[in-house]
Image (cartoon, helix red, strand yellow):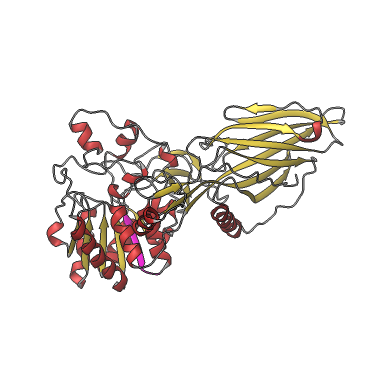
């Protein structure tokens, strides 16, 4: 990641020497340990997972003490690696999604994370089963009512400072704050109390990709020992808590967890990323009342000044050669102004071109315009719509599907606001067993795979056109 990202995370770990050298268990030893871990997970009554930077290295986010870690490179006077994709487009790893499946299966009871990348929350771990001890770069919170807002862009501040946005609750409206701790900030009591509670009753605490050096967080797994709990550490470097572990595994986290999922006969679910935007249409009659002056704006759902980081440009055209001039909106704010006859209704095609890190280059939406603003606000079942979008994206093995999830109207000025959800990435994960099966099969065309067994669909999306009535 960039230096700015490294600075943002610099409070997380001090510059210690413990654990810089990587260690790998021999293959036969590793396999034996994976099976032992799988048995512990299978028999556990209250499994807690404690994660560090090592769980996200396969997502393109560097760790701290590895050979290519932030602290290691800085100590050696070397430049930090270029990011393979923007931080806000980082996708959950195989391990992140395996934890989601373990939670859905009722095995995993709680996750404690020291990371600020937000990938546990984005992957699908329920908020009430997650403690983010150092905060979340994409999360804002209201200090007045406690509401939380997950963004699709990095919040601009750290240190629990006020941001430029306010709570959307009409009864509140307080200025929001970021959630990422700075050096002098104490760990949030709410997160810490929950983490301590679950560690005390855990019969297994599984530590994944963490150096276990930062206090007081590193002492949380030890609290399980008083009740007879077991500690498992999966990390490539040695940690100060190794002697306390019942099982110590030196191996890649993704490979270890993949083996556990194979042993438990559990499939790792695909990750479907859904982003949101809103189309705002404002209109006014001309002075002669024959024409309509209208303004169309494509904006973030997170606020008027919030960015739309996943959209590169928007191409607008009109169906049936109605004589209206096409337009290309190259940069934010994405806005189009036109004047048309009041009695004229027509259809507009909006082609959304996405940034390179999205799973498809573009998708189209047809917007009918008749300039009749409804007095009604449509209440839609957002959760059901999003679930259907995910299911369709997985079935079609591509992205670009979209649906209306909210619709509101105002009469003064005449304005229609329609919120869209759109699938921008679909990622599949293959366990070690599945990859080996593929390598043994003949005459089967395999999709592109990265070193950690992930597959990203780059199929051109089908044209998913929806016609909301303005």
Q: Is residue 437 left or right of residue 167?
A: left
Front in this rendered view, residue 240 or 93: 93
Residue 96 locus on image (x, y percent):
37, 54
Q: Residue at x 22, y 37 (%)?
A: 71
User: Quick check: 198 above or below 395?
Assistant: below
Front in this rendered view, residue 378 or 428: 428
Residue 4 locus on image (x, y percent):
34, 32
Residue 89 locus on image (x, y percent):
44, 41
Q: Is residue 218 left or right of residue 291?
A: left
Q: Quadrant of the N terminus?
A: top left
Q: Residue furthest left?
A: 243
Q: Is residue 351 left or right of residue 136?
A: right
Please, what is the dominant secondary structure of the magenta stretch? Answer: strand
Front in this rendered view, residue 12 or 270: 270
User: Quick check: 177 above or below 225?
Assistant: above
Q: Residue furthest front?
A: 443
Which corner quadrant of the image does residue 33 belong to?
bottom left
Q: Is residue 77 magenta?
A: no
User: Quick check: 147 above or below 344?
Assistant: below
Q: Is residue 169 left or right of residue 140?
A: right
Residue 414 locus on image (x, y percent):
75, 40
**Residue 267 visible, this orientation:** yes
Q: Quadrant of the C terminus?
A: top right
**Residue 193 visible, this orientation:** no
Instruction: Identify the magenta region.
Output: 106-113
Which corner quadrant of the image does residue 337 belong to?
top right
Q: Is residue 107 magenta?
A: yes
Q: Residue at x 63, y 46 (%)?
A: 419
């Amino acid at each position: 990641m960039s230096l700015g990202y490294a600075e943002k995370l610099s409070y997380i770990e001090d510059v210690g020497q413990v654990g810089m050298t990587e260690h790998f268990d021999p293959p036969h030893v590793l396999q034996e340990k994976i099976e032992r871990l799988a048995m512990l997970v299978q028999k556990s009554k209250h499994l807690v997972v404690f994660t560090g930077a090592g769980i996200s290295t396969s997502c393109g986010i560097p760790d701290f003490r590895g050979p290519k870690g932030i602290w290691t490179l800085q100590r050696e006077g070397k430049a930090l690696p270029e990011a393979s994709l923007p931080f806000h487009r980082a996708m959950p790893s195989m391990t992140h999604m395996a934890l989601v499946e373990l939670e859905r299966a009722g095995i995993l009871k709680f996750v404690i994370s020291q990371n600020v990348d937000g990938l546990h929350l984005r992957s699908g771990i329920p908020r009430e089963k997650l403690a983010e001890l150092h905060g979340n770069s994409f999360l804002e919170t209201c200090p007045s009512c406690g509401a939380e807002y997950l963004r699709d862009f990095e919040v601009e501040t750290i240190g629990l400072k006020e941001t430029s946005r306010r709570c959307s609750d009409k009864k509140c409206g307080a200025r929001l704050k970021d959630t990422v701790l700075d050096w002098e900030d104490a760990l949030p009591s709410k997160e810490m109390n929950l983490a301590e509670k679950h560690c005390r009753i855990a019969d297994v605490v599984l530590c994944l990709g963490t150096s276990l050096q930062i206090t007081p967080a590193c002492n949380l797994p030890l609290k399980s020992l008083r009740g007879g709990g077991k500690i498992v550490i999966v990390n490539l470097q040695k940690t100060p808590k190794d002697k306390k572990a019942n099982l110590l595994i030196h191996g890649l986290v993704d490979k270890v967890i993949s083996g556990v999922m194979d042993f438990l006969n559990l499939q790792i679910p695909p990750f479907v990323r859904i982003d949101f935007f809103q189309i705002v249409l404002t209109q006014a009659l001309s002075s002669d009342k024959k024409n309509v002056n209208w303004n169309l704006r494509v904006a973030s759902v997170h606020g008027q000044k919030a960015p739309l980081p996943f959209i590169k440009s928007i191409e607008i055209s009109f169906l049936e050669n109605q004589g209206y001039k096409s337009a290309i909106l190259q940069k934010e704010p994405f806005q189009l102004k036109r004047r048309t006859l009041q009695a004229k209704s027509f259809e507009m095609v909006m082609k959304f071109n996405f940034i390179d890190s999205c799973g498809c280059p573009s998708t189209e939406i047809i917007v009918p315009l008749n300039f009749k603003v409804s007095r009604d606000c449509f209440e839609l079942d957002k959760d059901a719509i999003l679930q259907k979008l995910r299911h369709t994206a997985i079935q079609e093995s591509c992205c670009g599907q979209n649906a209306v999830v909210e619709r509101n109207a105002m009469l003064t000025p005449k304005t229609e606001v329609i919120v869209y959800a759109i699938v921008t990435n679909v990622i599949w994960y293959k366990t070690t067993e599945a990859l080996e099966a593929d390598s043994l099969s003949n005459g089967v065309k395999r999709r592109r795979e990265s070193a950690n067994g992930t597959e990203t669909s780059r199929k051109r999306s089908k044209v998913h056109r929806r016609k909301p009535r303005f």
